Amino acid sequence: MSMAKGALRSLHQLHLELQEVHDKLGQGPRQIEARKKIVVRRQEELKKQGEQKQQLKMSADEKTLQLKTNEGKISELKVKLNTCSSNREFDIFRSQIDADEMANSVLEDEILEAFERVDGVQDAIGVCEQDLQAAHDEEARLAKAVADAAPGLQSEADRLEGSLAEAERELPSRIMEQYRRLVQAHGADSLAAVEGKICTSCHTHLSANEGVELNMGKVAFCRSCGRLLYRGEK
Ligand SMILES: [Zn+2]
């Protein structure tokens, strides 16, 4: 049984157009999902920075407390220094004070550094917050664009499905089962053009007889890849 010239090419074209619309419909939600992941990543980053700031601040506070304790100790030692009764005692207190003052000088440097690091993390948190806001905005923008485009794409899909069903009615009933299986397995790639004598799906050469039959409009499947064949435009 043969078909009208160009009918299978049109059928293939409809399959390809429908696939493109379905791809677009599927792409939107995937893109939104990807944006959501970026938002989550940035939330985690922000949380991490917040925790780091907390730790640095605790460490700076501990050191500040230590400094105050040492200062208290030094004051007490200075009082003792003024009231000591022997040179030996004086030397002991003096060297104790020197050691504590040295320790405090180190602590002061460390406290300064710790607060500088807190400031650094605070700056990083500011950047993270901006990045998070940008990610939120981008997700919202994309979600709106996808939602806006969906009805148009859906009605285009409906229209193409209608045309496809109409075009499929032209197919000989004896090949319908095979055709359905093909579509199930390969979707829009169920059909293949033959350019010259070559199946464009699997590059198999058609025999002379197969070529002649195809030119006569006979419905045939590629003996190698099983695609429903039609004569290409070249
Ligand atoms: Zn083939």
Image (cartoon, rainbow, N blue to C red):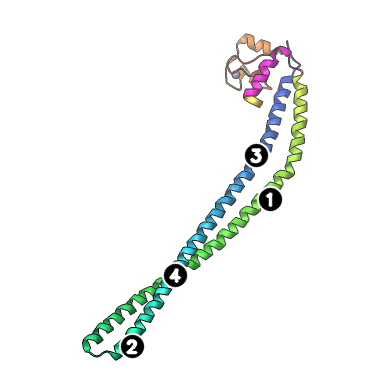
Q: What residue type is labelled 4?
A: Ala
Using the numbered discs, state the Cα–Cα distance from disc 3 to disc 4 in whole angstroms. Answer: 50 Å
Q: Which of marks 1 and 2 is nearer the N terminus?
A: 2
Q: Which of marks 4 and 2 is nearer the N terminus?
A: 4
Q: In which quarter of the image is residue 198?
A: top right
Left or right of residue 47: residue 182: right
Q: Which amino acid does label 1 sit on?
A: Arg
Placement of the N terminus among the 4 image quadrants: top right
Q: 18 or 10, which lies in front?
A: 18
Left or right of residue 126: residue 142: right
Q: Which of marks 4 and 2 is in front?
A: 2
Using the numbered discs, state the Cα–Cα distance from disc 3 to disc 2 in whole angstroms. Answer: 79 Å
The span shown in magenta is 170-185
Q: Name the residue under label 3.
A: 27
Q: Which of marks 3 and 2 is nearer the N terminus?
A: 3
| In the depicted structure, whether residue 97 falls above or below residue 222 | below
Q: In which quarter of the image is residue 149?
A: top right
- In the rendered image, residue 132, in percent from the top left (x then y), is placed at 59, 56
Q: Mark 4 points at which residue?
A: 60
Q: 71 or 14, which lies in front?
A: 71
Q: Nearer the viewer, mark 1 or mark 2?
A: 2
Report if residue 47 is visible in the image.
yes
Placement of the C terminus among the 4 image quadrants: top right
Q: Name the residue under label 2.
A: 79
Give me the residue at 48% from left, 61% from top. 52
Using the numbered discs, state the Cα–Cα distance from disc 1 to disc 3 in whole angstroms. Answer: 15 Å
- In the rendered image, residue 33, in percent from the top left (x then y), is placed at 62, 44
- In the rendered image, residue 77, in percent from the top left (x then y), is placed at 32, 84
* Pointer 2 local density, CA inside 10 Å: few below 14, some 14–19, many at least 20: few
Left or right of residue 197: residue 146: right
